Image (spheres, rainbow, N blue to C red):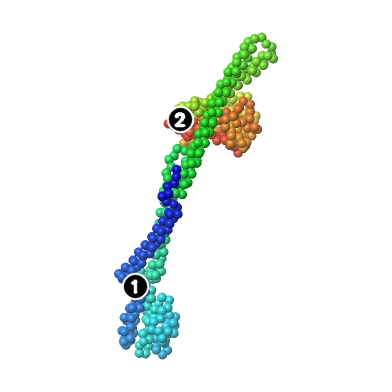
Amino acid sequence: MGIDKKKKTLRKELIKYMMTLSFSLAAVTALYVAVNTLGMNAGLFYPANYYEHEAEKLKPMLQSAERIEEDMIPDAMKYAVLDKKSKQKKAGNIKETELSLVRKKIDNKPYVNYKQKGYMIIDRKDEYCVLEYSVRAEFRSSFLRKHFPNYEMTSLCIMVILLIAVIFIVTTLFANRLKKHFETLNTMAKQIKQQNLHFTPEFSNIKEFDHVIESLIDMRDALQASLQAQWHLEKTKKEQIGALAHDIKIPMTIIKGNAELLSLSPHNQDQSDYIKYILAAGDKIDQYIDQLIHLSKAEETLHIKLKKAKVKDLVESVLNDAEAYIGGKNIEIELKARNLEGQKAAIDRSLLHRALMNILSNAVDCTPEGGKIDFEAACTNDTLIFTITDSGKGFSPEGLKKAAQLFYMEDKGRTSNGHYGMGLTFALSVAKLHQGDLTIQNAETGGGQVSITMPLVQD
């Protein structure tokens, strides 16, 4: 599937984001300037030269007044009366520290600006009157002037906050758009990981993302083809095993039949022993052939029949059969039952019984004389867990990976007579039929540990 050339690219999306951000910032800045202009025209705050104009209006009155009194000066201004000869303050509320610069400029400048303050020098007959006023914009409201005396700093902070808010909003919207595309990729990757290969992909409208989606689709198709090929290979192998087992069964039947005929004819003690060996070995081979035929057709003929059964009864039945299997060996099986009383589950009791017996028989064969096997059965709110731990040598690193594969047997430690690598394979198949799984590991005590975990279905 080709990528449409008309689709968007990440580069175009990034340019679009930058243009949107720039336009938004410019719009907010223009709106801010407009609001300030309207506020100034409406008289909500004073411009920076407002008090200078007010001082100019007062100048004629202050020049002609016989005596300057404090009530003649507006609250927003300060004043000082200086002697013309000594330039010492005679009256007023301007601090001496602020008058030092004014004294230096008093002869050649009627206006002095210093630290956002303006000083107007009014020439009177024998004295100077100095008015101090602010040369920065201020709020008209006395309440706002009190709490936010520096209008310029306040407005600058508001502007910065607005710009940061715009950047955050635009960036978040852009990130959320990209996040949806990343979530699509993540969902596809999870589906492939879980081998759920029948999903329908949802393409984005961005070329780079669609390239990745197409790559994931190719990966999905390749994995699906590989799994199908593997399934056909396994099916062919099992069919060949089943056919071979049937072919072996015919001559084996002939051998056993002739051995039984021989047992009816006159023979000495040695011959009688040989015939018994042949018949016993024939019975074992028949058992293995039957199990091979069963495993070769397990996926086709092994049908699960779920029926509600008491979990405790199943565990006790398996435990009784396991103790019978132990026979005269000095091996102890310790049952650890948790929350089994009154618990019922929808299971195929026969299949699950055989699966647990396969695991227990392996554990018995791998446990030395005087050893112990822990058989733990537990029910939680939604899970049924069976864990069998022996006291043998444990699984080798290779065995941990391959123990449940058909015909796999360890070279050391866990091989024993009578087992041909089929028990755990069957147990795994039963666990899968119950929507569960089989796990193999080594216990902290050193022995092998096999667990079957499945959902606790009660209906």
Q: Is residue 11 left or right of residue 443?
A: left
Seen in the picture, residue 424 relative to 27 is either above or below; the reply is above
* Position of residue 108 measured from the top left corner of the image (x, y, whole percent): 41, 86
* Position of residue 380 measured from the top left corner of the image (x, y, whole percent): 48, 36
Q: Report the amino acid beneath label 2.
A: Ala
For label 1, the SS is strand
Seen in the picture, residue 409 relative to 6 is either above or below; the reply is above
For label 2, the SS is strand
Q: Which mark is residue 393?
A: none
Q: Which residue is drawn at 41% across and 75% down?
A: 116
Q: Mark 1 points at which residue?
A: 46
Viewer can see residue 187: no
Seen in the picture, residue 447 relative to 212 is either above or below; the reply is above
State which mark lies toward you, 1 or 2: 1
- As rendered, which of 396 and 338 lies closer to the eye? 396
Seen in the picture, residue 323 relative to 448 is either above or below; the reply is above
* Position of residue 267 measured from the top left corner of the image (x, y, whole percent): 67, 11
